[in-house]
Amino acid sequence: MNSKLTGNPVVIYSENLPGNFDSCEVLRGIIVRFCKSMDFAFGRLTEIEMAVGEACINIVEHGYKNRLDSPHIGVVVKKYENGLEIILCDWSATAFPLDVIAALTPEEFMEQHRSRGLGVYLIRTCVDSIEHKFLDGQGNISTLVKLIKGAPLENA
């Protein structure tokens, strides 16, 4: 558990979603619904919605390589007194450590005339903390935390 989260966690969602882009949209909607029920400010709600959506897209695109027969994406959402913890699990052989992988800054993105590559930066700047575990041969577990109040950490 992230040390900034307080209270006893309550699992409010636990599901295996199909490993495709449609599931990313479904997951974003689920996160929005929970954030609204917890009185997240609109800006903080949109930050976690974007971060979770981008993390899900990364699983489908980079982990599962857009395969039609992709494994599922495991999702667990825990509610605390002061925020949410979202755990995303995939069964990819590709390690994608969101917490340490090199991330372009917007300045580097523009200087390099890139059209893609800001996803990891977006995720890191939109959450209060992120942890990643790669279980060799079994997949990735990414844990995103968003507090109801407070400014995102500069962890990009």
Image: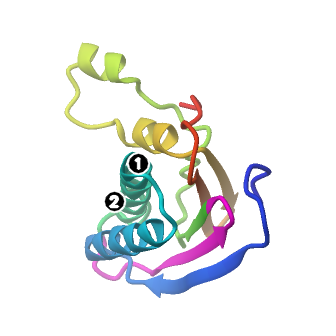
Q: Label 1 crowding class (10 Å Cα cut-off): few <14, some 14-19, many 20+?
A: some
Location of residue 91 (image quadrant): bottom right
Q: What amino acid does circle 1 point to?
A: Glu
Number of numbered discs visible in the structure rendering: 2
Q: What amino acid does circle 2 point to?
A: Glu
Residue 127, position in %: x, y? Answer: 53, 46
* Residue 80 painted magenta: yes
Res. 141 visible in picture: no
Relative vertical location of residue 67 with respect to residue 102 in this rendering, above or below: below
Tags 1 and 2 touching, CB below 8 Å: no
Q: CA separation, marks 1 and 2? A: 21 Å
* Residue 57 painted magenta: no
Res. 10 visible in picture: yes
* Residue carrying label 2: 61
Residue 51, position in %: x, y? Answer: 43, 52
* Residue carrying label 1: 47
Q: Point out the stretch of residues depicted in magenta.
A: 67-83
Kindly identify the residue that appears in the image at 80 percent across and 51 percent down: 3
Q: Nearer the viewer, mark 1 or mark 2?
A: 1
Residue 34, position in %: x, y? Answer: 47, 72
Kindly identify the residue that appears in the image at 40 percent across and 40 percent down: 122
Q: Nearer the viewer, residue 25 or 34?
A: 34
Tell me the element at label 1.
helix
Q: Nearer the viewer, residue 67 or 38?
A: 38
Q: Label 2 crowding class (10 Å Cα cut-off): few <14, some 14-19, many 20+?
A: some
Q: Nearer the viewer, residue 16 or 4?
A: 4
Q: Earlier in the sequence, mark 1 or mark 2?
A: 1
Kindly identify the residue that appears in the image at 35 percent across and 17 percent down: 108
Residue 75, position in %: x, y? Answer: 53, 76
Q: Is 33 situated left or right of 39 in this image?
A: left
